[in-house]
Image: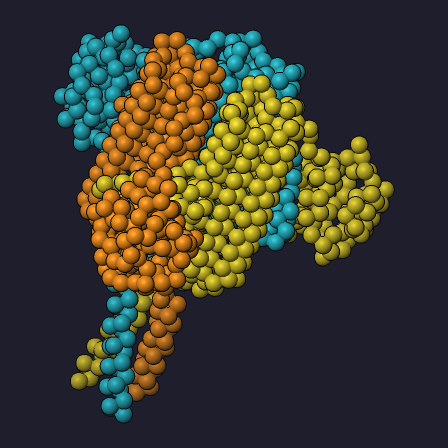
Chain colours: A cyan, B yellow, C orange
Amino acid sequence: MGKKVLEIAEFLKAAVIGDKDVVIRDIKGIDEAGEGDLTFIANPRYRKKIESTRASAILVSPDIKKSAKTLIVVDDPYASLAKLLAWFYPPREEAAEGISSLAFIEKEAFIAEDAVIYPFVSVGRKARIESGAVLHPGVAVGREAVIGEQSVLYPNVTVYPRCLIGKRVILHAGVVVGSDGFGYANPGRENLKVPQVGIVQIDDDVEVGANTTIDRGTLGKTWIKRGVKIDNHVQIAHNVVIGENSIIVSMVGISGSTKLGRSVVLGGQAGLVGHITLGDGVMVAARSGVAKDVPSGQIVSGAPAVPHGEWLRIQAIISKLPEMRSTMLSLSKKIEELEERRKAKG
Amino acid sequence: MGKKVLEIAEFLKAAVIGDKDVVIRDIKGIDEAGEGDLTFIANPRYRKKIESTRASAILVSPDIKKSAKTLIVVDDPYASLAKLLAWFYPPREEAAEGISSLAFIEKEAFIAEDAVIYPFVSVGRKARIESGAVLHPGVAVGREAVIGEQSVLYPNVTVYPRCLIGKRVILHAGVVVGSDGFGYANPGRENLKVPQVGIVQIDDDVEVGANTTIDRGTLGKTWIKRGVKIDNHVQIAHNVVIGENSIIVSMVGISGSTKLGRSVVLGGQAGLVGHITLGDGVMVAARSGVAKDVPSGQIVSGAPAVPHGEWLRIQAIISKLPEMRSTMLSLSKKIEELEERRKAKG
Amino acid sequence: MGKKVLEIAEFLKAAVIGDKDVVIRDIKGIDEAGEGDLTFIANPRYRKKIESTRASAILVSPDIKKSAKTLIVVDDPYASLAKLLAWFYPPREEAAEGISSLAFIEKEAFIAEDAVIYPFVSVGRKARIESGAVLHPGVAVGREAVIGEQSVLYPNVTVYPRCLIGKRVILHAGVVVGSDGFGYANPGRENLKVPQVGIVQIDDDVEVGANTTIDRGTLGKTWIKRGVKIDNHVQIAHNVVIGENSIIVSMVGISGSTKLGRSVVLGGQAGLVGHITLGDGVMVAARSGVAKDVPSGQIVSGAPAVPHGEWLRIQAIISKLPEMRSTMLSLSKKIEELEERRKAKG
């Protein structure tokens, strides 16, 4: 199944520089692409490979103006790649149809007629699995939980009782939604468990990466709003709120009751203390430790996190500390000499 | 089902300031609470909301002496909240009863009569599931392992062979107990696997958060003592020992053979190297990296971790490094001038 | 079943100092060992216990030349321990035989005759489970995936469609192989999902720790080469390549498209940004944050990571910052005095 460059350009509303009739059979990375493949340059780091790739055509941004290769020119090559991949690789149908006889559905649970329930799935009493939802093997949905339309739960996902999952949500393998938050009175001494009686609510179009955990609220809810994308191995504590379209990269930890605005971006392995607020559009650099509120639009780095510019200044000096120390020692010496001369002079 | 403030106060042995006859129907967070709800102030950060909340009554500590709202005054509002939630929200009965016919029990395994075994649970040969234990769907218990009385294993928990789980232990979804420790001879070259033939022993009243992993000992055991509470995504390596009532916050990593005393508190994302000892009551700040022994009662911060006071002093200076550097440059200049004048004078 | 020290020494081609006829019944840690046990000293930290251990014999390196105990002297006690444990603790047979009738095998899947498939395993269409492979309860293998000869997948492992697992690979409980990489166009705004159509390829003799996640390539593959050992809770993003025999310690995160050479060692909780290359034999200290390429053989530390020697110098100064600051303040004062005297003199 080949497509001509011209066809692809029309699909993307893109300009072509070079041969419009080249037939494209597949899309590949710049190092792996060969005859008949389309590749792409989304990261400037790979521009130097533009002439050495063996791809037949390259998806590029407008600042690349010529090449011996055929170029398909778009404003955002990565967004265009997303569209092309969805076109070249339509999702396959599910093998299983309907409700497997090897699934365990408790009484009073509702399963939509066109939902797909694989073997070894369990669905608790009064839970609802809405139209078009797909529950892969080993998924456990607790009582009174809801899985919205067209949502996909990959193998071995656990959704605890009463949690609410919206429409078109994707939960990757091993995700846990609704485990108890970490709350004990008199920690270290009595460790009296505070019952966690709230829920998790995940709104529409959220995707959650493999083995990520989202704890239920102590009271009320932990709330992941519409369009949020969460990577693998993220920890979201009780009563956290994450605003629309935020991006949480892998291995981030967010402590209890912290609130994020819309379109917040948290870099990998960052950590946030509890009970703080990050405004809309805040960006937190990878591995930062955020210990207080961050106003909208600010970029912060470091642990403890400070505005990014400040962090850069401090970081530049830290790398020069050995030099700074030897300057200081030489200053000490000079002053000593000046003082001695002064004394000698009386 | 409402309860009068008076009833609640009697249950908690608390004083009341205000209307003892207000009827409380639910317990909610300070922002969500409304007419008929009780809320609480456990963190001073929320005191400013005491007048704006729409709750009918507030659980407070004795330093809050008056309000237009009805106050229930207790020494430790968070501990009282724990008791109240257990009273308002009694645990529900399990739906499943007995041993599901969809579970897989190997021969010679022992299952107590009143244990609850959900579908898709597997229990290995000679394993023991004691009285009142609950194994949720997808739990796998290896051979000769023991799950103690009243313990609850949430969905998709794995307990490897021969591991010993005490009484009233809670293992949240996705927890792995008893996976092989990470031991290879000639690492990076031969990577010869050192068989991990020890076990994990978890004592009574321990709770372990979702997707946490606890490796079995190389020899002997990895040992989580009574009353320890572990959050989500924690990694506990082979032959670690964690003392009674310790608190391990999310995403902590503890390397092999490290020993913790009683009532140790490890903040989120902290990391401990192997073969060290932390004394009783040690506190490690979030994100710290601990590379050597810490004596009992000490608080440490930073990476590498140092006593907390020292860390504060260093941290204060780091934030002033740009200023310090410009002071130093101006000192250099002044000295240069002094030296030139001296030279000019001969 | 005891073995004489002489027998053990012959098995290890080792020298004996002391009584060759002592009978050894088990191998234990130095604190737990007693009469009839062999223990070992692989870490110099434990040498001081050589006389106090109650073990009957000790496996030691040649620099330990005498003791009241019987010594078995080998070049590498840890490697010898590995061999001895494999000898003393031969792997037990699997209880289950063949393909459980409680497993779910889709049509056109191939299962080798001597593979072991436990209950509640699901194997997708056209997947291949090769000879001697063992799939524990709750394992889900997607369509067209391959599990190579003698590989062991512990409970609740998920392998997504089309991923390729080599021979003698061990995947511990909760591992996820082949989940979607984290790729969205217009992050924070549109969050347009980039379909992840590549695979994961894991070569022979790889071991992966509990709850580790390895994402599939966006295009092409994420590739874990022969002999690599990965600890628990590691995150490996799309299109990462890890060279032969590398060692990845717990809680490391490796971002997209980063390439590691052979025999790289990454310490615990380290993080690597995307699109960088680490040469053969690179060592990254625990908790480091690596933001750029590292040439072969280099050891780096810190966040951002720098060559280890440089890090040590900087770290030494950071711990002396309070002292450095007070030196600077005293210099300032002296200069002020010098200047005033100069002025006074005219």
- How many numbered marks are there? 0
Q: Is residue B15 left or right of residue B97?
A: right
Query: Residue at point 35% right, 52% down?
Result: C39
Q: C62 or A275: nearer the eye?
A: C62
Any part of residue A140 in sight? no
Residue B24 vs C71, above or below: the answer is: above
Query: Residue at point 48% right, 31% down?
Result: B142
Tell me residue A81's x, y (percent).
32, 21
Q: A83 or B113: nearer the eye?
A: B113
Tell me residue C146's x, y (percent).
32, 20
Q: A272 or A190: nearer the eye?
A: A190
Residue A89 vs A212, above or below: the answer is: above
Tell me residue A274's x, y (percent).
54, 45
Query: Residue at point 24% right, 77% down?
Result: A334
Q: Which quadrant of the figure contains the C terminus of chain A? A: bottom left
Q: Is residue B342 left or right of residue B182?
A: left
Q: Residue furthest right?
A: B21
Residue B139 vs C142, above or below: the answer is: below
Q: Which quadrant of the figure contains the N terminus of chain A? A: top left
Query: Residue at point 64% right, 33% down?
Result: B132
Tell me residue C326's x, y (percent).
38, 72
Q: B244 or A339: nearer the eye?
A: B244
Res C60 quadrant in image:
bottom left
Any part of residue A193 in sight? yes
Q: Residue furthest bottom?
A: A346
Res A202 quadrant in image:
top right
Res A330 quadrant in image:
bottom left
